[in-house]
Amino acid sequence: MNAKEQQRVMVLNRLERSEVTAAEAAALMGVTLRHARRLLARYRIDGVAAMAHGNRGRQPIHTLEPALRDRVVELARVRFAGCNHQHLTELLAEREGITLSRPSVWRILRAAGLKSARHRRPPKHRLRRERYPQEGMLLQLDGSNHDWLEGRGPRLTLIGAIDDATGTVPAALFREREDAHGYFLLLQEIIEAKGVPLAVYSDKHSIFTVNLKRSPTVDEDLRGNQEPTQFGRALAELGIQSILADSPQAKGRIERGWETFQDRLVSELRIEGARTSQEATATLERFIPRFNVRFSVPPASPGSAYHPLATGPRLEDVLCFKYLRTVAADNTLRFGGEVLQLLPSAERASYSRTRVTVLERLDGGLAVRHDGKTVASRKAPPEPAVLRARYGERPALLHIEKSTPSNGQHHIPVRVERIPTSDSHRERHHNGRKPAPDHPWRHIPAVTKSQNR
């Protein structure tokens, strides 16, 4: 089973023991309530084998032909331009004989980047959502960009998490800006202190989800889904379900928590006279335990849903940035302005022209992996251009002199003289000016073929 199926088994086991409701289990698994009940019924009969979908790897029989998709897109752009999706669906059936459902037309046009001319959104009736019953089942993540130091120091962003069941803050930290590196550090602190949560709840920031406005790549079209973000990829490897909020009100738990932080924490930072990020972090570490005692609520179910990290890759190999690179013919690869030399191993003598994964860890260290195994590497020797720039001089010039020895045979003795590069010469070279008539370069005689022979 993959990480997603393992996470579903854990949720279904809790549902079987009545530790969560069916609606809560559906949200944790990212499925509808009806499908959650269907999964539970199959799980009771087939066990873990029920987690694998029966149609996995099969082409749906109702898949639309590519020619039909292209025809619908062409009509939407030319003949029926300006029609909304519902009107376009009716016109396709009436005038072109193309009978499709409105969701199918919407999916075709959305994939082509065409939006509906008019979009009607009915008003929403909001209800207060019930808390999840157990600690560690759902963590809400968010960042708050605020003048925490009130002008005494740099403007900082507070990145934190709040437990949906208890209202406690398991971890928080200050960063210069809201970035994936900060969320990696936050998740690392939570896992090391408490364990792996079942799910996280966040907004649709580009840290958590891909930008849907861009067109998918060829690999994403073949795979059927878009490439996840670095943080989304780490959540999938850890088996943590990612739930995206459609509005700020949906994650009101942490939004209201930030209001309390912006009131009480700002006051304590002012009282302690914090002026730097380090001083603010020290105050934050003393503030969080008092906040948890004052504002926490008892969970509906005792115990904890945090679970230990499963056997597999180390945490530092998951909470990192991963990039694909192609190895050059000399077994080197470039990354971040550096050149790494890959060393041979017992499995492979050469990695030339292979695709490898470069891991950029949170501490700045680099590692190279191929087929799930770490490849030994070191910093590659500098290139000639780097050496010339480092020592500030040009390579030795060969001054060739012709002489006639006593035996009558011609030979070309070579006298090597190193000519240092002066500042004036560098200026002439970089300005594109020609060397002077008395420049040493002009006194190198041409070597003819007869002399070479």
Image (spheres, rainbow, N blue to C red):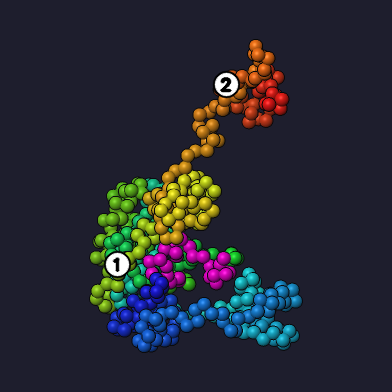
Assign a secondary structure to mark 2: strand
Residue with the mark numbered 2: 416
For marks 1 and 2 on the same chain, the one whose residue lies earlier in the sequence: 1
Q: Nearer the viewer, residue 438 or 84?
A: 438
Q: Please say whether residue 439 is visible from this viewpoint.
A: no
Q: Is residue 220 magenta?
A: yes
Distance from disc 1 to disc 2, alpha carbons, whole Å, reads 68 Å
Q: Residue furthest top?
A: 406
Q: Nearer the viewer, residue 3 or 284?
A: 3
Please identify the quarter of the rendering in which residue 314 is found. Answer: bottom left
Specify the segment rendered in magenta.
219-245
- The image position of residue 435, as x and y in percent, is 68, 24
Assign a secondary structure to mark 1: loop
In the image, what residue type sits under mark 2? Val
Tell me, for residue 308, which label it has, or none. 1
In the image, what residue type sits under mark 1? Pro
Q: Residue at x 57, y 70 (%)?
A: 222
Please identify the quarter of the rendering in which residue 184 is found. Answer: bottom left
Horizontally, residue 254 falls left or right of residue 124, namely left
